[in-house]
């Protein structure tokens, strides 16, 4: 899973943190007010030193005429104020007030200059928000509210200013000094220091400010825009990584071309820079002209990165690039509108990746992610609308709902408008709102105005949390050749929202005949069929659609391509699902049918096990699986998707009460049964698809590797010597990281005697490569072995592990708690205690990452009574911690509160 937005917060001081007696403020959308002042220009000067940094700012302020006679209140946290001047006049101490999070000046003119000097301590900033040090370099992260840790400012996205930035630092240690915009001056100073000055001609909110200083190397390229402008492209990395940047550069150029072709958007500055840093809370950040990236989403070589990493890099590079228009040129009015830029930009990056690779598989991966994580969030205590109504800590709202569901909401509008209508609507959006800070409503209004469609009811998708459920009944009347579908919808209650009105839901549909051909679709009242696939638009709580001229009882194929983020309930028999798995003309629905079939079977096996009966795998299922497996001329990537079993977490989500052991046992039993029954076919598949020749990141090669590694995954469940030898051979062949890691993960999960040796071998090879070591931690944390928790605890003392590096925390602790349900949910509660211990240890260092981790337990009410009590106890323990961050408080409090 990509974590473009995976966050962490505060550092050394306790400023801005809570004492137990404090009640953290909730911020409400309904309280939005335009800013009292505008800041037209900001000139910043940074002096970087070994122990601290001096920041001087010159702001040109103008009062908002609608907000008369108000004091100036600037945001600022963890700043030591050194001096303050208003229009060149030093302010006396009684003329202003410095609070823990603000600076107030009561008397100010309508238009004035404010000059301010502060001292900050980036070396001690472990929250990785604001200016901080990562290894030997300095970098910044300002979204959402990090700029206030750099200087006093109106730290809100609707204040857009022109920035100039001077940076002064020791030249030997920091030869490279970067900021947004264009480099306009460089000078050598006498004391071994040097200074540069950058100017960004585009007004921007301060969350898009960036600064980088370090001893970096870069690869350079150039791009000629559609209108013929040359853009200088640079990727900066630490010297040892210079040979891992090519894929990122290629992805960037592809993204630039794609945005011109699909949205008519050209890049607007003369230079575009990307910097890779090791310590980063999220995936990457779209700062104007100077993207800062988690090195995970830049660095790749075939021997160090997997196919998934290569694809992740392509997607995140594109995502951040696309933000230049959807986020930077047009930004958010306030943070409740976050999905305005994130949902839209995710939709854009999804479509870009679909065009670069295998469209069908990309869609399946995106929906798989949505169903596994967003549906779970929507059903839990942290459920919130795509446009939330309130928050305590905005960093907690960079969620799968705002991003992935937000993208689905844009996707539905794109489909409702059709390709031409959507392009017209986005053209209008760019034309109407360029240079502005706007709302999701403004976006929908453009969709309406360009198309003439009414989307008032559609706006519910932004307003209401929860996953709508569609219940479908069908009937067929042979005499009149009429087939009817009755669809009713309801959306479950979510925290603070009950009895929601019906949504406007596009349902893409096809009807299959007995040979699997799509039938022509004609609704009653129409004179002729309109194609073989069409979109039914639901608006009422219950609606019936009558199809005429249907010569035989058809097999319905609904929600093709995942046309809406809803759950579908329909009584389809296993044979119908098997038919669709084999014949649906929509690849997505073939996958969907296979998933549903496997899900049903596994859940039935869970019931059998709970009743003390034998778990049974019907021969029909094995046969259907075999037929799909041997249909060799198929798209291998799609086959791998169709043949993958649903994840344990997702299966658990489908139960009234999650049966942790039951789901694991049933899924493993099925895997084993498939491996034993289809042993020869699986071996043949592995052998026929061995890696030969050069590694290529082409869809066909990726598909071949994923299918072979899936086959190996099944085989290892058979426990045969042949399977083990295949796995070892693949590890030892060392052809590329995708295959090496797939084999290593299987060995790490096994009891094979070669397990320890393989892990030691991998470690000794890759000890000096932090990103590869993250994988080494993760494969061990994922192993469903009884000793995994103890292993994970032991690995925390490994010299390469650090609680200060978010990638390490995610790789080891996040993987164990989030991707190893059977061990994390150990009945003795040791997994829960471990999580709470780590969260409390991390909170004083990095609240954003701590809060992300704690979320992994927020669905605690879905488990049995004993586990609920154990998890609840840990939440209570977290809440009792003095000085808890706002981030962690919000997650713990809301997790406990909902449903009580
Ligand atoms: N906009 C950033 C996310 C910032 C998260 C701040 N806690 C990455 C992205 O979505 O592109
Ligand atoms: Zn984004």
Image (tube, grey):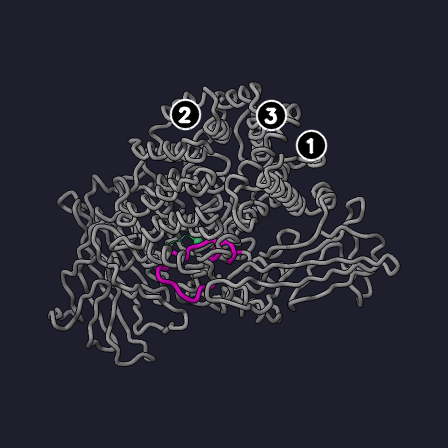
Which quadrant would the C terminus be assigned to in this image? bottom left
- For residue 428, the mark is none
Whether residue 835 is in magenta: the answer is no
Q: Quadrant of residue 102?
A: bottom left
Distance in Å between CA atoms under marks 2 and 3: 23 Å
Q: Secondary structure at mark 1?
A: helix
Q: Residues within 10 Å of mark 1 (few under 14, many from 20)?
A: some
- When the figure is inspected, residue 452 is found, relative to residue 166, above or below; the finding is below
Across and down, in percent, residue 43 comes to 25, 61
Left or right of residue 646: residue 820: left
- When the figure is inspected, residue 377 is found, relative to residue 539, above or below; the finding is above
Whether residue 404 is in magenta: the answer is yes
Which of label 2 and label 3 is nearer to you?
2
Q: Which residues are magenta?
A: 387-407
- When the figure is inspected, residue 659 is found, relative to residue 79, above or below; the finding is above
Mark 3 highlights which residue? Answer: 686
Q: Nearer the viewer, residue 77 or 23?
A: 23
Mark 1 highlights which residue? Answer: 626
């Amino acid at each position: 899973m990509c974590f473009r937005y995976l966050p962490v917060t505060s550092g050394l001081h306790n400023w801005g943190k809570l004492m137990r007696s404090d009640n953290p403020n909730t911020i409400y959308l309904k309280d939005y007010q335009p800013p009292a002042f505008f800041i037209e220009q900001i000139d910043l000067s940074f002096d970087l030193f070994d122990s601290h940094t001096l920041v001087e700012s010159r702001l040109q302020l103008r009062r908002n005429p609608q907000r008369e006679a108000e004091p100036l209140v600037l945001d600022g946290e963890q700043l030591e104020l050194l001096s303050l001047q208003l229009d060149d006049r030093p302010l006396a101490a009684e003329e202003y007030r410095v609070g823990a999070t603000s600076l107030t000046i009561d008397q100010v003119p309508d238009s004035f200059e404010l000059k301010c000097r502060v001292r900050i301590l980036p070396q001690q900033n472990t929250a990785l928000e604001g200016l901080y040090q990562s290894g030997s370099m300095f970098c910044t992260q300002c979204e959402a509210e990090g700029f206030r840790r750099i200087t006093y400012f109106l730290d809100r996205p609707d204040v857009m200013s022109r920035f100039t930035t001077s940076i002064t630092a020791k030249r030997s240690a920091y030869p490279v000094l970067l900021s947004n915009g264009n480099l306009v001056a460089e000078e050598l100073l006498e004391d071994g220091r040097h200074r540069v000055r950058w100017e960004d001609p585009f007004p921007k909110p301060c969350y898009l400010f960036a600064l980088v200083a370090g001893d970096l190397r870069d690869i350079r390229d150039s791009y000629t825009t559609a209108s013929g402008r040359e853009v200088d492209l640079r990727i900066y990395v630490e010297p040892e990584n210079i040979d891992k940047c090519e894929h990122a550069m290629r992805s960037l150029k592809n993204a630039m071309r794609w945005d011109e072709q699909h949205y008519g958007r050209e890049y607007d500055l003369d230079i575009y820079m990307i910097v890779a840093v090791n310590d980063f809370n999220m995936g990457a950040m779209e700062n104007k002209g100077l993207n800062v990236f988690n090195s995970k989403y830049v660095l790749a070589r075939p021997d160090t990165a997997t196919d998934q990493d290569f694809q992740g890099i392509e997607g995140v590079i594109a995502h951040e690039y696309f933000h230049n228009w959807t986020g930077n040129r047009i930004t958010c009015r306030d943070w409740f509108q976050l999905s305005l830029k994130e949902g839209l930009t995710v939709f854009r990056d999804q479509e870009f990746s679909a065009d670069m690779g295998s469209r069908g598989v990309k869609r399946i991966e995106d929906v798989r992610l949505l169903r596994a994580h967003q549906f779970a969030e929507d059903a839990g205590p942290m459920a919130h609308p795509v446009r939330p109504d309130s928050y305590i800590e905005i960093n907690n709202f960079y969620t799968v709902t705002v991003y992935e569901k937000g993208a689905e909401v844009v996707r539905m509008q794109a489909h409702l408008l059709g390709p031409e209508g959507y392009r017209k609507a986005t053209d209008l959006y760019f034309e109407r709102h360029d240079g502005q800070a706007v709302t999701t409503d403004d976006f929908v209004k453009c969709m309406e105005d360009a198309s003439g469609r009414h989307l008032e009811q559609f706006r519910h998708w932004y307003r209401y949390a929860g996953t709508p459920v569609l219940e479908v009944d069908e009937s067929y009347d042979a005499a009149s050749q009429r087939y009817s579908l009755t669809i009713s919808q309801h959306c479950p209650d979510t925290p603070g929202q009950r009895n929601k009105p019906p949504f406007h839901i596009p349902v893409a549909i096809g009807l299959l005949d007995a040979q699997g051909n799509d039938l022509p679709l004609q609704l009653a009242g129409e004179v002729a069929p309109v194609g073989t696939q069409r979109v039914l638009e639901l608006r009422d709580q219950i609606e019936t659609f009558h199809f005429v001229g249907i010569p035989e009882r058809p097999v319905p194929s609904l929600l093709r391509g995942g046309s809406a983020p809803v759950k579908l309930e329909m009584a389809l028999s296993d044979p119908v699902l098997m038919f669709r798995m084999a014949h649906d003309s929509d690849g997505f629905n073939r996958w969907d049918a296979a998933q549903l079939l496997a899900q049903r079977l596994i859940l039935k096996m869970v019931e059998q096990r709970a009743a003390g009966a034998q778990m049974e795998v019907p021969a029909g299922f094995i046969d259907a699986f075999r037929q799909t497996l041997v249909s060799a001329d198929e798209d291998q990537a799609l086959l791998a998707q169709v043949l993958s079993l649903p994840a344990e977490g997702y299966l658990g989500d489908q139960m009234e009460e999650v049966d942790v052991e039951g789901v694991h046992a049933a899924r493993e039993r099925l895997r084993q049964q498939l491996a034993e029954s289809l042993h020869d076919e699986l071996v043949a598949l592995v052998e026929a698809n061995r890696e030969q020749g050069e590694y290529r990141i082409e869809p066909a090669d990726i598909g071949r590797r994923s299918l072979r590694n899936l086959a190996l995954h099944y085989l290892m469940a058979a426990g045969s010597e042949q399977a083990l030898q295949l796995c070892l051979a693949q590890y030892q062949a060392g052809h590329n990281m995708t295959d090496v890691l797939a084999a290593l993960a299987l060995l790490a999960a096994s009891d094979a005697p070669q397990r320890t040796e393989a892990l030691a071998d991998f470690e000794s090879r890759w000890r000096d490569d932090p990103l590869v070591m993250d994988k080494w931690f993760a494969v061990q944390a994922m192993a469903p072995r009884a000793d995994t928790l103890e292993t994970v605890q032991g690995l925390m003392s490994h010299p390469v592990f650090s609680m200060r590096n978010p990638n390490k925390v995610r790789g080891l602790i996040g993987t164990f708690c989030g991707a190893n349900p059977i061990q994390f949910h150990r009945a003795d509660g040791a997994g829960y205690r471990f999580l709470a211990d780590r969260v409390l240890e991390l909170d004083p260092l990095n609240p954003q990452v701590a809060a992300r981790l704690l979320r992994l337990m927020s669905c605690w009410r879905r488990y049995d009574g004993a586990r609920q009590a154990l998890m609840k106890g840990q939440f209570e323990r977290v809440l009792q911690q003095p000085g808890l961050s706002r981030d962690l408080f919000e997650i713990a409090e809301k997790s406990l509160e909902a449903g009580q």
